[in-house]
Amino acid sequence: MTPTPRRLLLLAAAAVAGMPRGAHAQQVDIARATAFIQQTGEQLVSAINATGQSVAQRRDRVAQILRQAVDVEGVGRFILGRWWRQATPDQQQEYLKLFEQVLIHNLSSRFGEYQGVRFSLGRTQARTEEDALVNTVVERPGNPAFGLDWRVSEVSGQPKVVDVIAEGTSLRLTTRSEYSSVITRNGGQVAALLNAMRNQIRQMAAREGA
Amino acid sequence: MRPTRLPMALALGAALALGACATRPDPADPEAVAEFEQNNDPIEPWNRAMYFVNDGLDTLVIRPAAEAYRIFLPPELRTGIRNALGNLRSPVIFVNDVLQGEPHRAAATAGRFLLNTTLGVGGFFDVATDLGLPGHGEDFGQTLGRWGVREGPYLFLPILGPSNPRDLVGTGVDIATNPLTWVTGGADYDAFTYSRTGLTGLDTREGLIEPLDALRQQSLDPYAALRSAYRQRRNAEINNTAEVSPAARGMGFGAGTGIEGPRR
């Protein structure tokens, strides 16, 4: 097997993921995290408000921005939590692939409805040694503003989003609870979760095709 | 109930409760035990049954009613109703601000009540927010939380939604502290109370149409996702880190969905 760049990337990611979290964690620079969220937020807002583009085009652009900004692997591993070690390497690979599709789809379909959206930065606080929490306020015409917080971590020298917290509810904590429940209720089988995710992706595709 | 029936009822209740208990994980697996304790849902099978009942009720009756409410009432009128319901909750919010030792927030609530009741024509217009005095919600469940009372095991109740013993007690106390509960005034007043309760339910559910649809569509286990979201949201509310307009939580039940709906 020739090591294609993609395979190398996966290997490197697996190696990083295999290390204990925190062992190589860099202190995230708050100014950098804030600038990163400012930039990502502006990209998202201009993509969402791009007039003269179809809904599908806008959603694709939003998905592209999110794929770059979010530490999909890290988030995916955090969410699978204790079940990660119980999964076979093949299951881990498949899980990450499915998770990326589900996460990006769910996030971009939600952001896609935010026509006319504006956002502003709130105060930023460093939370732990590993990440910073950047507060933003999201406004839509005719709607009261709501708080959206971004947890930012340094992942191999790049600031990345590791969690989105809407009005106090963390996406990764909620999803972790959900996925673990699916596995526990199916006799501790990670395969059951993968099955459910595959079904979900099929349904998403069917809805979009319709 | 006649006394002879009591032992039987008790036995039946105990049997039901036992059958409804969640199985504890193997104590040799510390991570599984930690998760079980974090979920804090010892009567999960019972709660899931209630969730199922509620889901059916919601699909057949409650959500369609909320949709009709949205379709037949213009948005301006719905906003006005939402504002007015929030305004009627002000006394309860004020009491809880005081009980939590928050004089500034209490003053804000009192000021809003005065402004909105007068200039805002009985609370229909939220002039206070326009004048730079935004509202916030509080309830006795949050006050208990601030006093250090633990939430207790998770509860899911039909119609009321996610809750726990602390928030359920809070709901009862909020109803008792609401002056409107104690005013009596004949048939007209009763009609007003029923309308207020009905509108509160419709307004709350209408605001949750999109978030709950998204939850049903996107979650692999909506029950577990809602349980987690409700807890996180309540904690944020107790710490006053996530502000909610008083009307958005119009039920005044410590319950609520834990998800914020679009507010207009």
Image (spheres, rainbow, N blue to C red):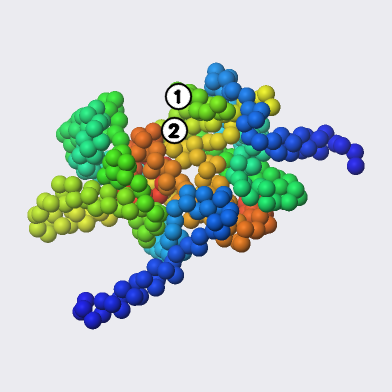
In percent of width and height, residue A101 lies at 66, 45
One can see residue B72 in this view = no
In percent of width and height, residue B203 lies at 33, 49
Quadrant for the N terminus of chain B in the image: bottom left
Q: CA distance from mark 1 to mark 2?
A: 9 Å
In percent of width and height, residue A210 lies at 63, 53
Quarter of image, res B241: top left
The kind of secondary structure element at disc 2 is strand
Mark 2 and mark 1 in contact (Cβ < 8 Å)? yes
Residue at the disc numbered 1: A122
Left or right relative to B59: residue B149: left
In percent of width and height, residue A128 lies at 52, 28
For this orientation, the residue located farthest to the bottom is: B4
What amino acid is found at the position of numbered circle 1 in the picture? Gly
Q: Residue at x 42, y 69 (%)?
A: B18
Crowd around label 1: few <14 · some 14–19 · many ≥20 (10 Å): some
Is the same chain shared between marks 1 and 2? yes
Q: Residue at x 61, y 39 (%)?
A: A75
Left or right relative to B219: residue B259: left
Q: Which mark is residue A41?
A: none
The kind of secondary structure element at disc 1 is strand
Residue at the disc numbered 2: A147
Task: Out of A13 and B86, give the one closest to the viewer.
Answer: A13
What amino acid is found at the position of numbered circle 2 in the picture? Gly
Q: Residue at x 48, y 56 (%)?
A: B223
Task: Out of A86 and A143, give the one closest to the viewer.
Answer: A86
- Kindly identify which chain the residue marked by label 2 belongs to: A
Q: Is residue A74 above or below residue B47?
A: above
